[in-house]
Amino acid sequence: MTFPEHELHFFQRFGLSGRLIERCLGEALSAGGDFADLYFESIASTSISVDESLVKSASQGVSAGCGIRVCSGDRTGYAYTDDLSAERLMRAARTAALIANGPSKQQMAGFREVPKASLYPISAADADAGIAPKLELVMRTDRAARAYDPRIVQVRAGFNDELRHILIAASDGTFAHDTQPLARLNCYVIARDGEKNSRGGSGGGGRVELNFFEGDKSPEHFAREAARQAILQLNAVPAPAGDMEVVLGPGWPGVLLHEAVGHGLEADFNRKKTSAFTGLIGQKVASSKVTVVDNGTMPSRRGSLNVDDEGSPTQETVLIENGILKGYLSDKLSARLMGMADTGNGRRESYQHIPMPRMTNTYMLSGEDSPEDIVRSVKRGLYAVNFGGGQVDITSGKFVFSASEAYLIEDGKITAPVRDATLIGNGPEALKYVSMVGNDLALDEGIGTCGKDGQSVPVGVGMPTIKLDRMTVGGTGR
Amino acid sequence: MSTATPISSAQSKTDMQQLAADVVERALRAGATEAEVVIREGDEFSTLVRLGQVETLKESGARGIGVRVFLGSSGAHRTANTSTSDFTEAGLDQLVRGAVDLAQVTSQDPFAGLPEQGAMGQLDGNLDLYYEDVYSMPAAERIEYARRAEAAALAADPRLKNSDGGSFDAATGHKVMANSRGFVGEYRRSYCSVAAMPIAQTEQGGMQRDYWFSSARTLGKLASPESIGAEAARRTLRRLNARRVATQRVPIVFAPEIARSLVGNIFEAANGDSIYRGASFWANQLGQQVASSNVTVIDDGTIPGLFGTAPFDGEGLPTRRTVVVENGVLKNYLLNTYTGRKLSMQSTGNASRGLAGTPGIGAGNLFLENRSVSPQQLLADIKVGFYVTELMGFGVNMVTGDYSRGAAGLWIENGELTFAVEEITIAGNLKEMLNNITAIANDLEFRSAVAAPTLRIDGMTIAGA
């Protein structure tokens, strides 16, 4: 193909050329590797925060680099450089090449550009725009949180955004590039009433421009949400302890799916047979009311990508359909070694990291129950609507997620708010207890970051209201 | 082999020090009243061997530079910071101009600013932080370390059939800092580690994983791959056939690698940033009894060779030893310059600084002091209890102290460790938990910068079947 050199960020800004890309891939395969790719990345980021109603800091950063990977069977060699000169790129290619041990056998067959969607604005205007409109967002957040209630005594509001340019060229002919915006507004507050203190937090965003925050998702929306949670928690009672019925609200509680099934269905763990879900394709792993998908193609979502970090188009992948385990999330390496299709889930934190299968936006499809009926059906249980982070042990299947806003359900009614409590379960079993699924699917506000093997990537989760007949609630009360 | 460069303007600067000082000058010329520059360079090598075959091999390095500027007269500073990986003339120019431009929009803050002249400095002498030998082995030998660790684990028992691998990592870091009040400092640190991550499986198919590792600043102090593999195998096998226990209150014993997470919670509670905001349950508690009288917690960034040691902190203050809790009484918060000024106290030399952002608070070597009983004696007193070997999740609220985390470990009966336990939570409130530390053992070991011996806490709730 002819490279559209005049259009591409890396060709313009860093003097990269099609000829150099071909030389680097040739060098990378010079020791007999059977696949190589180059991943160029350049990021410009801004962060500004208000604390005690003062703009105490503002930061901007730029970084650029290239990661070079060589695969030989199931072995991966990797090297990176933050210097995009021909000499340093060739040296990194030579280092990565050493994973293989033989004569060069690969013939490059030319590139084909990966057709890609256009899921998010890429005007690049925001990252270069002045700081003033971003400052206004955090100032408005601060004011709205303080105005909510005089018991709100501390407010920290922050805005972070980045614009990431990537270019991927691989020996299998892949040639892809993308420009990915990411923005997030956060608000953290502390409430005090006499001797009682509590906290609240909220935030949201996505692959969006600043005008996203002018609609429903305004600074005032996030500020009020953080303040509401903190005030509510001032009078929370101890959470109950033990197994009980649990109702999870719509949206962010979908972090349950991310931990309970999502990670366990990443192809690398199943290829190595280290996941609790190994060998369960075609088997029942959830109640027949449960259908879970991973979907990287949702416009403007935090977990969405036009192409993944290996240059493959993203897609919607069914993980669980009516309770039956259907598929895994894969990258190129696992797809090749397992003889399955690449689902476009190869992601990495940065050019310094080796890609691996990761989630994008993971959610459960709506069912037929009304949220009211779901709550009404519970005699004694927990209704949890907001969560902090979660974690999973892929091998044993045990997972946790921590409720930051939850209430008791007594005789079908939502009653007292409870203090923070962790919920724990077993991935391949937990969703078998789903007895009702609401008709109110919602996605989270755009705050999720997922960690795996020390690499962080932005993700989304979602869920309708659901009822689990049994889950363990880690409180201290009765 | 290591050196902490003495602060002395007479000494000729290294190239990196000269570059940092030049960029400080550049920032002042661009309009900053005061400026601080940090340069970091790092190299890393890592290899993972799985089921005897090399799975990944990674080798590279990168560097970056960050600048923090202040505008205005003392007593009313505006501040901003920028960072870049672009060391060209144009890149550095954009770095300092960007910071000065950005600072125009921030607020005047009477507490912002560089440390006072007299507060800055650095430790002299050899802190034993840097050994070139972490990179001295040829690649084949490094791979062999990883392979030996995994092989030793898998050879230990036929139930160890699978593995997340064995690994060998090495890294070096180089940090240079300079500011417009005359501070120039530089140090290097090295690191290497070997680990094994086996997976055990019962005949019924239940799988468990665990791991063990050794890390050190020099290859000479790294434990043998065979000993690491054997310990990883022991830890993994003891988790097999785990079951749940009923909801109940029993004494909980935190193994050292778990007790260190409680010291991490103590760090967050004493963190000056949370204290001045009232975001920690230890705000306004100095001088108060905040833990059992057997609890003494020290932060010491000066101990040669340890993982939390450095000659100066993230703002150019010498590191030091700070008593955080003494016999249960809260003695000191951990502070940087800004939080010190906010609280009308002195910085404790605990500023942490990456390339980007304003300085935060970081611990040096933070540890809970040993008491006299052995771990076996500590267990011997417990008729029924739970010995925690793993915690999951992030269920700790530092504002209220509420604590609720997923746990796995071993059940204690009549002073002995018996069957494996999983899929339960342990919960309480940190304020009460710290006052209910009823026993502390004598097995403190610095495997990382935060460390603690085995300890026992009474009054927590287990939620289970």
Image: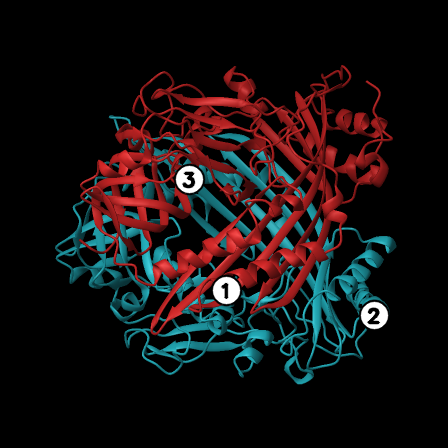
Chain colours: A red, B cyan
Numbered disc 2: what chain? B
Q: Which of marks 2 and 1 is in front?
A: 1
Spatial separation of the CA atoms under disc 3 and disc 1: 31 Å
Residue B121 screen position, x and y as percent = 66, 78
Identified by mark 3, the residue type is: Val
Quarter holding the N terminus of chain B is bottom right
Front one among A397 and A81: A397
Measuring 52% from the left and 45% from the top, which residue is drawn there?
A447
Spatial separation of the CA atoms under disc 3 and disc 2: 47 Å
Element at badge 3?
helix
Q: Does residue A352 appear left or right of residue A22 in this picture?
A: left
Reading the image, the residue beneath label 2 is B31
Q: Nearer the viewer, mark 3 or mark 1?
A: 1
Residue B266 screen position, x and y as percent = 40, 67
Q: Which quarter of the figure has residue A467?
A: top left
Quarter holding the C terminus of chain B is top left
Residue B417 screen position, x and y as percent = 20, 50
Numbered disc 1: what chain? A
Q: Residues at marks 3 and 2, common chain?
A: no
Q: Are marks 3 and 2 in contact (CB under 8 Å)?
A: no
Spatial separation of the CA atoms under disc 2 and disc 1: 37 Å
Element at badge 1?
helix
The label shown at residue A147 is: 1
Reading the image, the residue beneath label 3 is A255
Is residue A166 visible from the viewing direction of this image?
A: yes
Numbered disc 3: what chain? A
Q: Residues within 10 Å of mark 1 (few under 14, many from 20)?
A: some
Q: Does residue B282 appear left or right of residue A42 in this picture?
A: left
Identified by mark 2, the residue type is: Gly
Q: Residues at marks 2 and 1, common chain?
A: no
Q: Does residue A177 appear left or right of residue A373 in this picture?
A: right
